[in-house]
Amino acid sequence: GFIFVFSLEERQSFEGLRTFRDELTSVYKEDPPPSVIVANKSDIDAQRWTVSEDEVSSLRLEWPNCLQVINTSAISGVNLADVFEPLCAAVKEREAQRRRLAQQREAALQLQSDEPRLTNCCRASDQRCRLAQCADAACTVQ
C-alpha cells in the first residue's frame, strides 16, 4: 500500500500528487494497491490552507483504489494512527485475495492436467472419438 502526503499550506506539494497518481496508474494499470492520501498541517488555521476541501475530494475521486483522505497534524499527532490502520487492513485483504485467486488458478490447472489425453485421435472433447475411435489400435488414452 501507499501513503501520499501533502501539506495543506503548500500548494506545490498537493500538485505533485497528480504526478504520483499518474505513475501509480501507469505501473499498476488495472489493479493498483490501496492507498491513503494524507492532508498534513490540519492544525493550522483553515484560512492559511492553499488547497480547498473540494480539490482534495476531487483528487480522491480520480485516485484509483484510494481508501480515504485523512487530515492530520504531525505536530499534535491528530489522526496519525488513522492513516495506517485502514491501509494495513486493506493490504492484508488484497494479499489474501491474491492468494485465493492463485490457489484457484492452480487448482484449475491441476484439473486440466488430470484429464486423460488422447493421441493420434480427434479432440478429447469429442465423445465419439473416445468411445468409437479410441478402440482403434492407433489411438491411445494416456
Image (cartoon, rainbow, N blue to C red):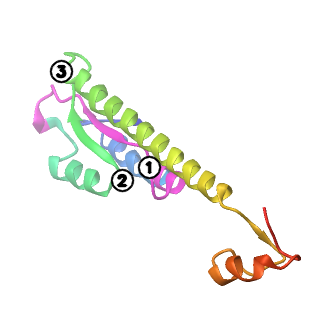
Examine the rendering and report whether any part of residue 96 can be seen: yes
Q: Secondary structure at mark 1?
A: loop
Q: Is residue 121 magenta?
A: no
Kindly identify the residue that appears in the image at 45 percent across and 51 percent down.
19
Q: How many angstroms separate mark 2 from mark 1 (CA)?
A: 7 Å
Disc 1 marks which residue?
32
Extent of the magenta region: 24-47
Disc 2 marks which residue?
64
Query: Left or right of 18: which side holds 66?
Result: left
Q: Of the residues shown, which amino acid type is indicated by label 2?
A: Pro
- Dot 3 or dot 2: first in sequence order is 2
Quadrant of residue 91 within the rendered picture: top left
Kindly identify the residue that appears in the image at 70 percent across and 62 percent down.
116
Taking 52 as reference, is 36 above or below it? above
Q: How many angstroms separate mark 3 from mark 1 (CA)?
A: 28 Å
- Dot 2 or dot 1: first in sequence order is 1
**Quadrant (top left, top right, bottom left, bottom right) of the N terminus:** top left
Instruction: Verify CB contact (< 8 Å) between mark 2 and mark 1.
Output: yes
Rendering coords of residue 133 (x, y %): 76, 82
Q: Of the residues shown, which amino acid type is indicated by label 3?
A: Val
- Dot 3 or dot 1: first in sequence order is 1
Q: Of the residues shown, which amino acid type is indicated by label 1?
A: Pro
Q: How many angstroms separate mark 3 from mark 2 (CA)?
A: 26 Å
- Total marks shown come to 3
Please give the label number shown on residue 78: 3
**Quadrant (top left, top right, bottom left, bottom right) of the C terminus:** bottom right
